[in-house]
Amino acid sequence: MENKKNNKKKPLKLSLSGRLQVRKNLGPSGSGKNQGNKKTIQIVFKNKNNQQKSSSTAKSNFRGSSSFRTSSFRTPNAPVIFPKNNFKSKSTKNFRSNNNTAIDSKKNQQKRTTLKPTNKESRKLNLTKIIDQENQEFDKFPSLAKLKRASERERNKNEESVEEEKIIKEIIIPEIITVQELANRMAEKTAVVVKTLMKMGVMANAAQSLEADTAALVATELGHKVKLVNEDDILKEIEDKADNENDLIKRAPVVTIMGHVDHGKTTILDAFRNSNVASKEAGGITQHIGAYQTNKDNKKITFIDTPGHEAFSNMRARGSKTTDIIILVVAADDGLKPQTIESISHAKAAKVPIILAINKIDLPAADPDKIRKELLNHEIIVEKLSGEVLDVEISALKKTNLGKLESAIHLQADLLNLTANPKRSARGVVIESKLEKGRGSVATVLVQKGTLKVGDIFVSGSEWGKVKALINDRGENLKEASPSQPVEVLGFDANPLAGDDFIVVDNENGAKKIAEYRSKKKLQKKNTVIKTNVDEMFKQISKGEETFVDVIIKADVQGSAEAIESSILKLSTEEVKTRVIFKGVGAITESDVALANSSKGFIIGFNVRSIPQAREVAKRDGVDIKYYSIIYELIDDIRNLMSGSLKPDLKENITGNVEIREIFTVSKIGKIAGCFVKEGNISRNSKIRLLRDNVVIHTGTINSLKRFKEEVKEVNHGYECGVMIENYSDIKTNDIIETFEIIETARKL
């Protein structure tokens, strides 16, 4: 009865889903006659652990409907009697079938602990608490990001389990290499390389540079083979190789036309080519380097027409031997001019044979014999005066004796025996370069060896490119260019310098590396302090590599220049000889600087100064210019300068005599000689000779000098000391240590 009262006082409140489930289980409501037969609902509470194991859907279903059983108030053994008017026959059948199905499913299910309420508080059903608990349990499910991370870890485990075979590479390591570049060459992750360095105690990031030894240790640690190379080794790929004599064929001579302005250089070239080049130039003066080839009776000649000898010297200063023969053009009515004399100096410095062309002989004032006599002053003796220099009298305008000049060129070429191998990769030199709108960087290249073809990859100085087109001097497109043939080359990435080499390489990657290396060296040279030619010259002389001092003299008057020349030549000795490669009158120009640079000499200015452009070029190229106003000071200065280039006299001075009386052997150190100073003294910096029976068995230096246990700088006569010889241990008792010093005495002229 108490339970009934409690149930009445505190009725259970079910949610809408719970009430619907109750109706479904109980079936439709009966008639009003049997309303007195009350039905009880027993709520079964499930264990919390079992709730967590089941799915969320099952949880919600159990909470919503719990587990309901219906029963009448009857005796335990009384049979179950359903009222007739409560259910229809159809409903009763459905209920029984549903009940049987529920019983069968319960048999198959595992037994669950059923908690029955023990007190009044536990009988309360707080739906809010149940819903909050359900939400908390839903929050315990993993998030989508967590599931993705888990799947990623699983995939990584699978990848690690299937280990691929590691590819071992041969890594080429230069003197300096960055961490990133090293990782790329090994095909390893940068993080792996950094981790390996950290294990070795080196903290470095991807952009930092490593020495070759450290990089080699890292590569070896990661299982790769190492090949150490110097940066200069990259240039070995483009070193010139000797050609097989069987592949050599005769090539056309390369002729450079030089001389004074308006003496007819370009007119001679026009006459050979049957064209008019000079009319295209500003004022009829050649403004740029032109390279052309003529072909008469299957005999080819390549001509290089320069705007002056400066360009010729600039090319020679870069180490390029562009020409085989020089034609010196002199106007018969004008005689020798300053530029003619400079051209002679440049030709002599290049050690190239000269052919004299005396032009304008058709003019009434022409006097060829006067030209020949003037050239005697410059040590050019023509054949008519029993010399070796070929000379031809011509008239370029009227095309007189051009055949003789051409024959003289072929004769000189036969004497030189000019040959080349066309079956190799092309090598050449850049004559000029320019930037043209619509065509990019265009360079005139003289092919010296091999055959240049369209599509070849090349390196020129610090630039590289791929040959896109070849154009000859007549504007015709070519597929290939043979030796001694000048062509315009399209395909440079930037403008090269006149005199730069032109070398065809195998692949684009090699071309880029060489160009990058040269560019880096060029930048380093630009940022370093440039030693003057004088410093370099006397340094080579002191090593015995140089025997001549080349001097260029510029004075205010010709008499002063000749006096200075004779005074300097008198200072020559057997070891060092002075050589005046050019003397002239007037200011120091860029041409003088170019000649001094190519000859590795220096310039003397007597009562003259250099023009601003010449000063800039001299500063850039490291050419030394010395100014004087008193001739005696000039001679004294040159004498002292040459005296400094002489090797000093060396004199030996014996400073001490030490006897070895005892030998002590110390582990991990070596043998120490217990000595007594018999004569003079012995110092820490002394050079020594070890004598045994008055025979020198070793010459070297002292590693350690001690008196008692203290290191000392010097031990004097009559005292004992301990001596350890540098990198030598074959010492015996009664050996004599002789100490000496070398005294250098400067020599004077």
Image: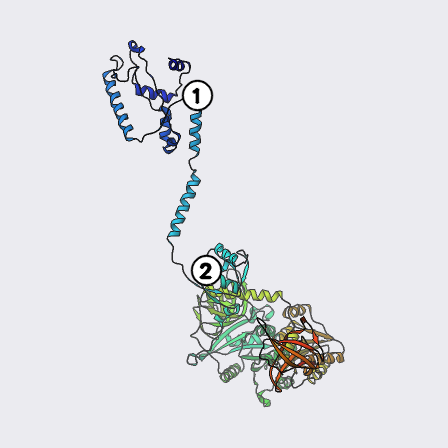
The structure residue drawn at horizontal position 28% and vertical position 31%, both measured from the top left corner, is 108
Vertical relation: 415 (above or below) 594: below
**How has the structure been colored for display?**
rainbow
| Disc 2 from disc 1: Cα separation | 71 Å
Q: Which element is circle 1 on?
A: loop
The structure residue drawn at horizontal position 40% and vertical position 52%, both measured from the top left corner, is 160
The amino acid type of the residue labelled 2 equals Leu
Q: Nearer the viewer, residue 613 or 719?
A: 719
Q: Quadrant of residue 354?
A: bottom right
Please report contact status of discs 2 and 1: CB closer than 8 Å, yes or no.
Answer: no
- Residue 664 percent location from the top left of the image: 61, 76
Crowding at mark 1 (Cα within 10 Å: few <14, some 14-19, many 20+): few
- Residue 421 percent location from the top left of the image: 44, 77
**Which mark, residue 222?**
2
Q: Is residue 724 visible?
A: yes
- Residue 241 percent location from the top left of the image: 47, 76
Vertical relation: 498 (above or below) 7: below
| Residue furthest bottom as drawn | 386
- Residue 144 percent location from the top left of the image: 42, 39
Q: Nearer the viewer, residue 74 or 84?
A: 74
Q: Considering only order in the chain, which callout, 1 or 2, is on the residue closer to the N terminus?
A: 1
In the displayed structure image, the side of residue 564 where residue 15 appears, left or right = left
The amino acid type of the residue labelled 1 equals Glu
Q: Quadrant of residue 17?
A: top left
**Viewer-side label of 2, 1:** 1
Residue for badge 1: 121
In the displayed structure image, the side of residue 437 where residue 43 appears, left or right = left
Q: Is residue 472 visible?
A: no
Q: Tell me the quarter of the image containing the N terminus.
A: top left
Crowding at mark 2 (Cα within 10 Å: few <14, some 14-19, many 20+): some
Q: Which element is circle 2 on?
A: loop
